[in-house]
Every structure is written in C-alpha cells, then in structure tokens.
Amino acid sequence: MPALLYLGCKIGYNLRFHALSKYPGPLAWRTFEFPHRWYKATGRLPFKIKELHDRYGLVVRTAPNELSFVDPRAWKDIYGHREFMRPDSLRRRPPGVADNLITADADTHARFRKVMNPAFGDSAVRDYEPIVKAYFLKMLARLDERTHGGGYVDLLHFINCGVFDIIGDVTWGRSFDCLEFDQPPALLSVLLHFKAAVIASSISPYVGSLSRVLTPKPDLIRLDHVFASVRQRVSERVTGTARQHDIMSYMLRDPKHSDAILSEAEIQTNSLTLTMTGSEPLTSTLSAAMALLLANPAQLRRVSSEIRAAFASLDDISAREAAELPFLHAVLLETLRIYPAVPDSRLRQVPPGGAVVAGEHLPTGTTVAMGCYSTFRSSRWFTDADTFAPERWLRKNDAEAAEAVRRFPAHNLDAYQPFGIGPRNCLGQALAWVEMRLFLAMLLWKYDLEVPAGEDASSWMDQKIWWTWEKGPLHVKLVQAQ
C-alpha cells in the first residue's frame, strides 16, 4: 500500500506540479524514465526522439526532468556556455583514473584545451597532411591487392584500418599497423565496451560496472590490452628524448614554456580519448558517404567526374585543392546532415541559478539536449530532410543557387552544427576535414564504385545507435577508373 501511494504521488507530481509539467510529450515519458531508458538500451533513442519532435514540436519532455530541443537557438544557449555540464552519470570514471576531455569539469577542460588546441591548429594540421595521405595511399594499395581478379571488398574494414593507423601515427608517431597486417584495430573493443556501458546505464545510472559483465570476454581481453598499450606508448614518450611533431609533442611541452601542463595520467586518458573520438566518428562519416553515393549513382558520377577533372594524378591531390571542389564539399556536408558523426543527444544540465534555453526559463538541474539526428532531419529546417541531396548546398554559383533555393527552400544553417559549438566543440574538426577530403578525392579518382549484385546500398543505413552508429560490412566492387 505505501508503495502504491508513493507511486501515485510521484505520477501526480510529475504530471501536474513538476517544473517541466507544461512541456509536451507522451504521457509515459513525462511520468517515468523507463521509456527513455528502454529506447536507449535498444539503440533506437535518437530515431524515437525525432518522431516525438515531429509530433510535439520544437521542445519535447523526454523524461520527467529532461527536455529535448530542435530549436536552433538552443545550440548557443546550451553549448555556448561552459557552465552547462554533462550530467554526473556521464562523467563518472573508475577510481584512480584521471579526467579526460569528456569527464572533466569546466576549469580542467579549459586547461586541457589550452594544451591541445595548438595540436589541431591550421599549422599543425598542415604538418599532418602528408601522414594522412601516406596511409590512404597504403590503403589504396591494399585495395588493389584485394580486388585483383575481381570480386568485392568490405570497404568499412579498410576505412577502419586506415583511419586508426592515421590517428595512431598523428597522436603517438606510431601507427597501429592495421593496414600492414590487414587486421581490424584492437581499439574497436573499446566501442563494444561503450555499447555495453550505454545498455548498463540505461538500466540504471548506478550500474555502470555491469558494462564489464555485458562485454564479451574476448573483447574485454582486447580492451585491457588496449589500455596497457596506451600506457606503454605514453610512458615511452614521457621517458624518451624524441620529440616528434605529433599530438603527443604538444602534451609533453616543457612546462617552462606553458602555464598549462598535463600529468602523465592525464596524457594517458586524453590520448585514448583523442584516438577514439578522432577515429570512430570519422569512420562513420566516410563509410556513410560511400553508402549514400552508391545508393545515388548520379551523384556518385558527378562527384567522381569533378575530382578527376581537377587532378591529373593521385600525387596532385591535396586537401587544400580538394576543398575548392564544390560538389565534393556538398557531398560531405550532406553526409554529415543525413548521418551525423555523433547522432545521439548531447546531454547537459542547467547550472545553478537556472537559465534560459530557446526562450524557455528552466530551473537548476534540468537535463537539456540538442540531438543532431532529430535536428538535421527536421523538415522545419531542411526541405526533403530525409533525402540525400548534396545539391541543396550549392548556393554560391548564381544559377545553381537559384535552383537550390527553388528545390530546397528550407535550409537553416543555424540548425546545422555537425561539430558542435562552444568550449566543448569538436577539437579535431580541421584534421577531420583534411581526412574526409583526401579520402573521397583519392578513392574516387582511382576507382569506379559499384554495388555488388544482389545487394542494396541503401539498406546499409538501417542501423542502431549506441553512442555511435552500429555499422555493418559495406560491400563494394571496385574497378580501376579509365
């Protein structure tokens, strides 16, 4: 009886007296956390939240104390201020493990960024470009070997190998040798652990330790090996005399020349964080771009022709000149819109004293979020929002701009923030653009791509989301371009 009385009071409070009771949403979501947790655990939460916004509008109550926004004003209001922190449940770390860019409080995060920002500035990224191009050339050589005599390849596998080798070399001056031995990176076990952690936290924010139980044992062994490898790599650089021009060299700056330094433990956790955030989202974007182009042959032909007209050889391809190709750029922008690299909601909590988000006065402790998937796929902001249409971004040339405006009148750039904004925006976006442009330009200059007989490229997009996209093999037939 007391339990029923408590439940009745909780339902009545959440529906009638809670500070968020005026906001729309399904009855069950406004009353209990279970619906939100269920969709999160099953990998369908971003898709469901988009459905709710389509039905209820710009702001939806997705849990008793949580609001989801697709109002473009909320980007700046939530993420433009350092006081909006991730909820505590997303910032927990094991005892004895140092903070990283994701878990750090505002002051610690600012110190980390002060150290790392120069490692991702324009000058540093220009120095990384030859490394990026060398690994993509190696990837193309492996593709040549695999496709000799016909057949198809799993392009996702080679993208994974190439991207992880690049981030390993750029971070530590040493790759993971994925392309060398044609083996997937051991760091993928970290992603499986993240999936288990998401499922565990969906059951309860206090059972994160269940993630080790839910992670398959072979992947746990690889995960422990990854952490040991990271510690070894960092230790070698800390105790060694070599100072290569890589991300680690910025973390190991002489404290006499910087008022912001990192401890060895902080270097370990942040280098692993950079490796994951600098690889998996990029792998998602590159594989999605290929799948979307394969599903849209006319656009694949157009971007391939543009690339081949601009460059006489692979050696001629550079990120700077590739950035001048309008349709290539449009393909990447549209890929990031249709298939955001970080599709899940970016949860934050309203700081002490309350705050205004998109014109709404919200109390302290309210959880708020903008989801890239639900915002970028909103028909309020983009005409034919579920259609892959790079042409919508061609708005510089007068003739093409007029056609783009006619076909796609809704085109709200304030809603489109694929790399986030504010003090916690994507640290490595300049490097990501170099990698995206070089990969597409080099692959599409060298090969004509075809979908293997009996397969449907568009079905590759049917995925679930646990922090990141759960991608399957991307089978592609590669033919040397004439």
Image (cartoon, rainbow, N blue to C red):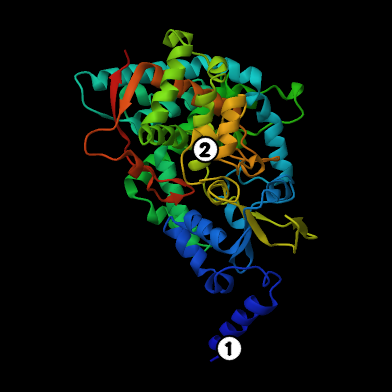
Residue 54 shows in this picture: yes
Residue 296 position (above or below residue 95):
above
Question: Hey, which residue is sitting farthest right in the picture?
Answer: 353
Residue at image x 73%, y 55%?
357
The reply, left or right, for residue 445 in relation to residue 114 is: left
Residue 108 falls in image quadrant? top right
Label 1 sits on what residue type? Answer: Leu
User: Measuring 62% from the left and 46% from the top, which residue is drawn there?
Assistant: 103
Q: Secondary structure at mark 2?
A: helix
Q: Quadrant of residue 20?
A: bottom right
Gap between marks 2 and 1 measured at Cα: 48 Å
Residue annotated with mark 1: 5
Q: Which residue occupies the extreme left position in the image?
A: 149
Question: Dot 1: few (<14), some (14–19), or many (≥20) neighbours within 10 Å?
Answer: few
* x then y, percent, for residue 311: 46, 11
Pointer 2 residue: 336
- Horizontal and vertical percent position of residue 195: 43, 50
